[in-house]
Amino acid sequence: MRFALTQTVNAYQAMPAKLEDLPSLAPKLEDVRRANVAHNVSLIGEAKGMGARAVCLGELFPAPYFALQEHPMWLALAEDALKGPTIKEVCKAAYENGMVVVAPLYELDAATGKRYNTAVVVDERGVVLGRYRKTHIPCGANEKGKFTETFYYGPGDPPEGEPSYPVFATSAGRIGVNICYDRHFEGVVRSLSRAGAEVVFSPAVTFGEKSQRMWGLEFRVDAARHRVFIGGSNRLGTEKPFNQEYFGSSFFAGPDGERLPNLSQHPNIVVSDLDLDALRRPDPSGWDLKRDERPGIYAR
């Protein structure tokens, strides 16, 4: 079955050239959102034309990656994840293209006033199946720049009785999501795998030397260790006025630790064929890690 990832940057063309001019963008945030949603909807159509059954858009796709600095202006971009304007347009695109779409956006929970970094899963009928709120929220810096996400949103806190890492049954298989920083924590993919995930999407915005070095390793190791497919997506390029470079390198990892071929020639779309039946065959290594683990001996 064919799956797709996007790797793109902010599509709004009238961004200010200088950081000090960012406040002039405040009255135009809806234009920023509309431009990015339109761009990503077009990528959904492109992926459909390549035969993809499911596509994962980029982390916080309706805007530039604003968490490189603390600026209250961006708080106004948060929206209802289940009924807001972005998800309505994504649902329409999913229905028109007959595709499963994972849409990571900036959520405002109207009931609590809290903000989250949230991925919404939409099926091919244009119906919202549910959402996952990013669990691990980073705040730090590397040699390339800062990331101040804790200023903008907090960690997801699922209702009592619901899983921290939900898995969604779709026509394209059982899909789980972790978002960016989540990928570094050892229990996340294990939890998704144990809950029956076949494909784990990991949309990210990442940069820096160590991040780039580990990017090609973490997904492959987790995919092999837990026998799932993992699709990691990252922005590709730079965004005014921040001019932070994102290295892209989006790819799918398979359950034998392999990097799957990218069948797309489009610079903003990665497409790979995932043999989900391989997950039901014995591990060719002869390993059975799920059977042979001894959870009682590990540090907690």
Image (spheres, rainbow, N blue to C red):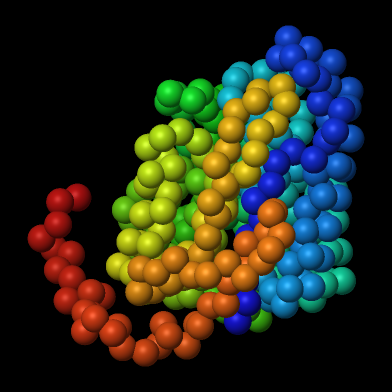
Please state the horizontal and vertical placement of residue 83, each as a whole percent of the image: 80, 52
Q: Is residue 74 above or below residue 215?
A: above
Instruction: Point out residue 244 in the picture as x, y percentages from the top left corner.
Output: 60, 28
Q: Is residue 159 visible?
A: no
Give the left or right position of residue 262, taking residue 14 as reference: left
Tell which of 177 and 230 is nearer to you: 230
Q: Nearer the viewer, residue 36 or 137?
A: 36
Q: Residue at x 67, y 18 (%)?
A: 71
Look at the image and tell me whether residue 258 can be seen: yes
Q: Is residue 10 left or right of residue 297?
A: right
- Expressed as whole percent of the image width and height from the top left, the position of residue 122 reads 71, 65
List x then y, in percent, for residue 169: 59, 76
129 or 18: nearer the viewer: 18
Q: Residue furthest front?
A: 265
Residue at (63% x, 77% y) in the render = 2
Along the horizontal axis of the image, is 196 left or right of 224? right
Q: Is residue 67 above or below residue 118?
A: above
- The answer to whether 49 is drawn above or below residue 88 in the figure is below
Q: Residue furthest top?
A: 20
Q: How many marks?
A: 0
Residue at position x 18%, y 71% from top?
A: 293
